[in-house]
Amino acid sequence: MAENARNRVNAAKTAFAVVDGLNELEGAGVTELATHLDTPVSTVHGYLSTLEQEGYVVNDGGEYHVGVRFLEYGACARRRTDIYGTAKPEVDRLAEETGNLANLLVEEHGWGIYLHRGMGDHAVQALDTQVGTRVSLHATAMGKAILAHLSESRVEAIIAERGLPRMTRRTVTDRDELHAELEVIRERGYAIDDEELVEGLRCVGVPVLDDTGHVFGAMSVAGPARRFDGSYLTEEMPRRVMDAANVVRLNLTYS
């Protein structure tokens, strides 16, 4: 690759690192961001100035933030997914009928990405997530439901790249234990997050598959562990989410 081409690639990587850093810090001054990125202040200032001029970041009295222009790209990315428009009404219906928090997730680059969330009347606010948030697949019911229907080589590649970080004391961090659980999920048709992402929160996740077994994504309903217990957790909620996922599957396959 020519030197200029390498420089352009490195410049693009630095620009995205600056944006990612602002997002991680939820806004920062030049010096704070430079320290966070371990990059010279002058370099960071130059990138921030350019990004501000192009409308991608905003300067609020010396503290920079990611600009709302990114919403345009996020909305476009969400619309291009096959599952979003079809699953959104079912996610909202699940939230309304159960009174809980209902979610829609897809896998991208080995992460779980929230595409939509529905808030029921009694939905918990324990999850520090929103549309667009990335989560580790192995620590969520939806993520495990997706992993269960990926090829073994793809699952291994995701583990190699993303690892199995511990989110709570209940998170599955052993490779063999995870594979054993994925086998169970394939057999019964749903996954459970037993306080593995957030202490005190349980979740039931179901994959959305086509007739060939390809996984589009996953849907879930989440609630407090004290309420998500017994047959409500292992029978009623799986049935509700599986019914909703089946509606989405049919609409995706035959519409």
Image (spheres, helix red, strand yellow):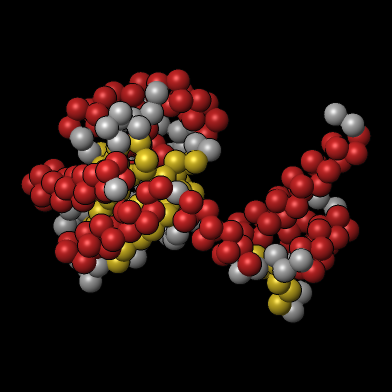
Q: Nearer the viewer, residue 70 or 35?
A: 70
> Is residue 59 found left or right of 119 in the rendered image?
right
Q: Vertically, is 38 above or below 172?
A: below
Residue 239, can we see it? yes
Q: Vertically, is 214 above or below 48?
A: above
Q: Residue 234 placed where, x, y %?
A: 13, 43
> Who's the residue at 25% across and 57% down the image?
90
Q: Residue furthest right?
A: 3
Q: Residue 197 placed where, x, y %?
A: 37, 47
Say how many tags the image has.
Answer: 0
Q: Nearer the viewer, residue 128 or 68?
A: 68
Residue 194, can we see it? no
Q: Residue furthest left?
A: 231
> Who's the residue at 73% across and 74% down the image?
59
> Is residue 40 found left or right of 82 in the rendered image?
right
Q: Residue 165 placed where, x, y %?
A: 47, 37
Q: Residue 200 placed where, x, y %?
A: 28, 54
> Is residue 189 found left or right of 148 in the rendered image?
left
- Residue 173, quarter of the rendered image: top left
> Who's the residue at 34% across and 65% down the image?
125
> Who's the residue at 49% across and 36% down the image?
110
Q: Nearer the viewer, residue 111 or 82?
A: 82
